[in-house]
Image (spheres, helix red, strand yellow):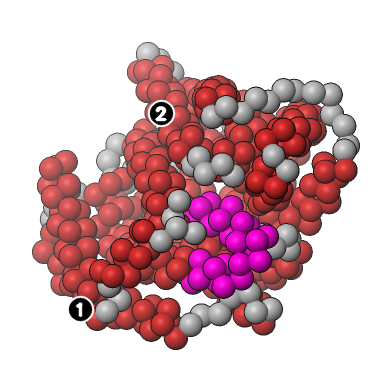
């Protein structure tokens, strides 16, 4: 299956999930705004999700998928199944132990991340309660991620890319129940508690779906007593440095959370709402490409097909910039219009929108770099080099902390978002440099030329959007259909301008697109 088709499958489902996630945050903003309950829930939701990215989508997946793929295609179905069973047994024990300890230590964890919450009556205690309710989601979704990696190694990308949809459906239901409870005499806390319960329920639903998908794919797993076999030891030895690298990245998320909780109430919620808008294109482009590349790149490298591996990463970089550059520019230019039209209403005010628009702009400037990081990292993981990304992530974390200390006191939550962009730029520059020095990746003149022409097309789109923005100034905060019409006009004009300019400048070539779609890897 081709890179474009795999990425398109993951990207399409990821896009659908991000749309529902965005709808979820829109409704949450209107129900709770940037309030005490909103901040408490955002913190409680950050905790299991951050550890999920650390254990499941980070360190574990990038090591497990190549090893499982090699066992499956080299040693056969029986050996691959045995390896998966051995890993599952250890994985479940580790996750259960960590989850139990974290729930017991939750007051200390919340104090470390959000000690300032104690200055607001009830906020610290609510955060602890919600975090304890949501944290079991970590164990459930981590097993889901393992099953997803198992299916990805078999070129079955649909189930794993579909599970985030289930989370959003359950959270939307929880939000509805919470709103009903508030109308029946409850308060904002009722919505927050209902959402926290929905998070763990969603994990149960996701696990049930993935177990069904694995069985439907003909894979039979069994839960055995844990044993440290040679293969499991090798997996663990590779996971440890990768976990350190992923841990460094996730530590930067905790650093951002810590700084956000030191700012005025609502800052954490505004940061998370803004990040949702920023994550929409990042998830569609970056995560989709990264997920599709890793197993394909692993096969090329282990087969000694170095030229094919180079070509695959070059195509990936070109696809990433083709999609990320215009998305970042459009969001940066139109962020006040998008935030006002999509979020203002209910408990979410125009003042909240003004701050959030600045956050979105600061975040999306770094979007192309963040997408490229997702595309470049598999070049190390597929070669079982997990140490180098650790060192690069460490450098990025130090830069993030240093920049935060400088900009947060002066620029507040917008400065915090800008520090994320600086970190991403440092990360991608260092990764490209190392890959080039090792001879693993080289940006050819053809690819560089196309990226330059993509930039020209992006500038043309920005010029058109800047002219159009004032034309709909009275529409962004008007009725539903007026808001929808204004955003549709902006998006339509941006898309038409970019792709027309890309075609005219040669950044978008019909023959090249056909090659990307048809060429198998």
Q: Which mark is residue 504?
A: 1
x, y (%) of residue 428?
57, 72
Predominant secondary structure in magenta?
helix
Residue found at x 56% / y 56%: 296
Residue 438 lies, with reference to residue 181, above or below; the image says below
Q: Earlier in the sequence, mark 1 or mark 2?
A: 2
Most foreground residue, 120 or 47? 47
Q: Which residue is mark 2?
A: 169
Question: Which mark is on residue 431?
Answer: none
Residue 125 seen by the camera: no
307 falls in the magenta region: yes
Quarter-of-image position of residue 214:
top right
In the image, 287 versus 1, the foreground residue is 1
Q: Which residues are magenta?
A: 289-314
Picture coordinates of residue 136, whole percent (x, y)? 65, 28
Secondary element at tag 2: helix
- Image coords of residue 463 (percent x, y): 21, 76
Left or right? Give the position of 244 relative to 20: right
Alpha carbons under labels 1 and 2: distance apart = 42 Å
Q: Disc 1 on helix, strand or loop?
A: helix
Q: Is residue 329 left or right of residue 139?
A: left
Question: Label 2: how many residues lie within 10 Å, few (<14), some (14-19) or many (20+)?
Answer: some
The residue that appears at 42% across and 70% down in the rendered structure is 318
Camera-nearest residue between 74 and 45: 74
Residue at x-position 22% and y-position 63%: 495
Q: Is residue 520 above or below residue 103?
A: below
Q: Which residue is situated farthest in the bottom direction here?
A: 445
Residue 324 as seen in the image, left or right of residue 71: left
Provide residue 470's location: percent of width, then percent of height. 15, 66
Q: Is residue 104 magenta?
A: no
């Amino acid at each position: 299956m081709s890179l474009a088709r795999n990425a398109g499958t993951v990207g399409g489902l990821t896009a659908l999930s991000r749309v529902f996630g965005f709808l979820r945050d829109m409704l949450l903003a209107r129900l709770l705004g940037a309030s005490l309950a909103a901040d408490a829930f955002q913190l409680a939701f950050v905790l299991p999700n951050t550890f999920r990215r650390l254990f499941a989508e980070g360190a574990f997946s990038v090591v497990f998928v190549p090893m499982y793929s090699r066992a499956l295609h080299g040693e056969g179905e029986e050996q691959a199944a045995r390896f998966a069973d051995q890993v599952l047994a250890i994985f479940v024990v580790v996750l259960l132990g960590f989850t139990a300890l974290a729930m017991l230590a939750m007051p200390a964890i919340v104090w470390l991340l959000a000690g300032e919450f104690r200055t607001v009556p009830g906020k610290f205690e609510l955060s602890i309660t919600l975090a304890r309710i949501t944290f079991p989601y970590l164990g459930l979704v981590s097993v889901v991620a393992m099953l997803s990696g198992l299916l990805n190694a078999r070129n079955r990308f649909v189930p794993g890319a579909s599970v985030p949809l289930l989370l959003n459906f359950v959270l939307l239901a929880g939000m509805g129940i919470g709103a009903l409870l508030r109308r029946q005499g409850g308060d904002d806390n009722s919505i927050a508690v209902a959402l926290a319960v929905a998070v763990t329920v969603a994990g149960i639903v996701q696990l049930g779906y993935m177990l069904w998908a694995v069985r439907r794919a003909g894979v039979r797993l069994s839960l055995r007593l844990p044993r440290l076999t040679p293969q499991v030891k090798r997996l663990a030895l590779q996971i440890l440095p990768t976990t350190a690298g992923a841990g460094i990245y996730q530590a930067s998320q905790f650093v951002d959370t810590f700084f956000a909780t030191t700012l005025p109430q609502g800052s954490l919620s505004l940061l998370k709402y803004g990040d949702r808008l920023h994550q929409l294109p990042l998830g569609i482009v970056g995560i989709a490409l990264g997920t599709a590349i890793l197993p394909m790149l692993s096969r090329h490298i282990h087969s000694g097909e170095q030229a094919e591996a180079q070509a695959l990463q070059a195509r990936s970089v070109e696809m990433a910039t083709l999609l990320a550059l215009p998305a970042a520019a459009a969001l940066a230019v139109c962020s006040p219009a998008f935030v006002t039209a999509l979020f203002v209403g209910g408990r979410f005010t125009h003042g909240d929108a003004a701050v959030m628009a600045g956050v979105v702009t600061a975040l999306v400037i770094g979007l192309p770099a963040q997408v490229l990081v997702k595309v470049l990292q598999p070049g190390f993981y597929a070669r079982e080099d997990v140490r180098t990304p650790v060192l690069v992530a460490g450098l990025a974390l130090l830069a993030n902390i240093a920049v935060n200390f400088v900009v947060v006191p002066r620029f507040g939550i917008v400065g915090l978002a800008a520090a994320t962009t600086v970190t991403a730029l440092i990360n991608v520059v260092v990764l490209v440099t190392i890959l080039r020095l090792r001879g693993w990746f080289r940006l050819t003149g053809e690819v560089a030329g196309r990226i330059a022409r993509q930039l020209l097309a992006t500038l043309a789109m920005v010029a058109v959007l800047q002219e159009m923005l004032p034309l709909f100034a009275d529409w962004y905060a008007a009725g539903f259909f007026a808001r929808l019409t204004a955003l549709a006009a902006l998006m339509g004009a941006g898309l038409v301008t970019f792709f027309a300019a890309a075609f005219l400048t040669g950044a978008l070539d019909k023959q090249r697109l056909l090659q990307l779609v048809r060429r198998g890897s």
